[in-house]
Image (cartoon, rainbow, N blue to C red):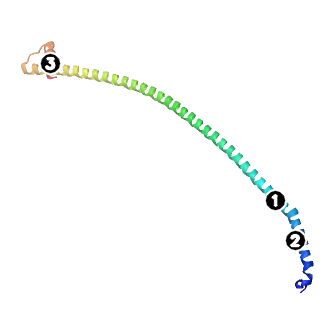
Amino acid sequence: MPQFDPSTFASQIFWLVVMFAALYWVVAKLAVPRVGQVLDQRARVIQDDLDRAMQLKGETDAALAAYETAMSAARGQAGDHMRAILADVKAVADQRTAEISASVAKQVAEAEARIAKAKQDALDSMNKVAGESASAIVAKLTGLNPDSGAVTTAVASALKDAR
């Protein structure tokens, strides 16, 4: 094998050094800068993406805060509307209750008046029937016709004592 021949070692070492230097120069001047540029570009893209994400996160946080504020205001307005509606409904219900109570009180008063009149009519009728019965009984038992004023007075006195 020629590469193991010691007489060719000097030329082999020379070409090894020349080729190593050439490859080193190609790698150092061409390949490494291109790889560095690609890495730098990738780092810039990643940093730009992170910056954009932070900016969007800030915008999202601001939008969320605005949404929460709007929702809070809307809830407050809804509560105010509900309280106003409930107050209106309560006022209408109180008014209707007062009207119905007045109507019922009027009907009760009218019914009490009718009952009192019916009671008085019944008492008057009872007094009349009692007076007629007493006159008929006295006439039947004694054969005399009693004075109707005296009978009415006696019946009224007896009924007054019975009450």
Q: Is residue 32 above or below residue 48?
A: below
- The residues tagged by marks 1 and 3 sit, at their Cα atoms, a distance apart of 136 Å
Q: Nearer the viewer, residue 82 or 41?
A: 41
Relative horizontal placement of residue 48, taking residue 111 as reference (left or right): right
From the image, state whether disc 1 or disc 2 is nearer to you. 2
Q: Is residue 122 above or below residue 31?
A: above
> Residue 146 occupies which quadrant of the picture?
top left
Could you tell which of marks 1 and 3 lies nearer the N-terminus? 1
**Residue hosting label 1:** 36
Could you tell which of marks 1 and 2 lies nearer the N-terminus? 2
Relative horizontal placement of residue 106, taking residue 56 as reference (left or right): left
Q: Nearer the viewer, residue 99 or 23?
A: 23
The image's mark for residue 97 is none
The x and y percentages for residue 135 are: 13, 19
**Residue hosting label 2:** 20
Q: At x 38% / y 26%, what residue is drawn?
A: 104
Inspect the image, locate mark 3, and give the three-letter code of the amino acid beneath it. Answer: Val
Q: At x 63% / y 41%, what residue is drawn?
A: 65
From the image, state whether disc 1 or disc 3 is nearer to you. 1
> Residue 151 occupies which quadrant of the picture?
top left
The x and y percentages for residue 98 are: 42, 25
Could you tell which of marks 3 and 2 lies nearer the N-terminus? 2
Inspect the image, locate mark 1, and give the three-letter code of the amino acid beneath it. Answer: Gly
Q: Residue furthest bottom?
A: 1
**Residue hosting label 3:** 155
The x and y percentages for residue 148 are: 15, 14
Inspect the image, locate mark 2, and give the three-letter code of the amino acid beneath it. Answer: Phe
Q: Residues within 10 Å of mark 2 (few under 14, many from 20)?
A: few
Relative horizontal placement of residue 36, taking residue 84 as reference (left or right): right
Secondary structure state at the residue bearing disc 1: helix
Quadrant for the C terminus in the image: top left
Q: Is residue 157 above or below residue 100?
A: above
